[in-house]
Every structure is written in structure tokens, then in C-alpha cells.
Amino acid sequence: MTFPIYRKYKNNQSYFKVESSSKFEEIKLESGKWKRYSFEVSILPDRNFILDMCTNYELYWDEIAENEYMIISNQVV
């Protein structure tokens, strides 16, 4: 798998940058403002979350390009 991988929830409320099999970033719309959260995962459920975003994403996430992620990233408060 080649990282980074970019995804967004189908409702456009969260955007993700998967940096590795144990690290990802989420930009989430909260109260009308974009906020960034970084995660270093170590437990199995979180590792499975990353794996799902990378391989079984079609049901919950859409694949996006880096430039779409960067547009949202530039709006973070």
C-alpha cells in the first residue's frame, strides 16, 4: 500500500489523510468550523479502522485526491 491515502465520509463532514498503517489525520466540521485531529494508533480496533479506510472504504468513505484534502486543510481554524 502506498501512503498517503485520502478519504472523506460520504456526508462530507470529515476528511482523512492516512499517513501509514498506524497514523492518520482527520479534519472534521464542528459547529461550522474545520478542526484537525491527529491519531497515532496502537490498539487493534483503531488499526482495523485504518485498514478499512484503505481497503474496504466504498460503503462509508469516498476516495479523494490530495488537492481536495488540501482545500479543506487550508480552512482549518
Image (cartoon, rainbow, N blue to C red):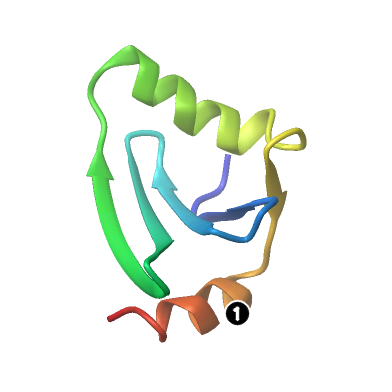
The residue wearing badge 1 is: 67
Residue in the picture at 60% in, 79% down: 67
Residue 32 vs residue 17, the one in the foreground: 32
| Residue 11: percent from left, percent from top | 66, 54
Task: Determine whether, in the image, residue 61 is placed left or right of residue 5.
Answer: right
| Residue 31: percent from left, percent from top | 37, 67
The number of numbered badges drawn on the structure is 1
| Residue 34: percent from left, percent from top | 38, 72
Residue in the picture at 32% in, 34% down: 22
| Residue 42: percent from left, percent from top | 23, 23
Residue in the picture at 42% in, 77% down: 73
Using the image, determine if residue 11 lies above or below residue 58.
below
> Residue type at mark 1?
Asn
Helix, strand or loop for disc 1: helix
Using the image, determine if residue 70 lies above or below residue 13.
below
> Furthest-right residue in view?
58
Quarter of the figure with the C terminus: bottom left
Using the image, determine if residue 64 lies above or below residue 40.
below
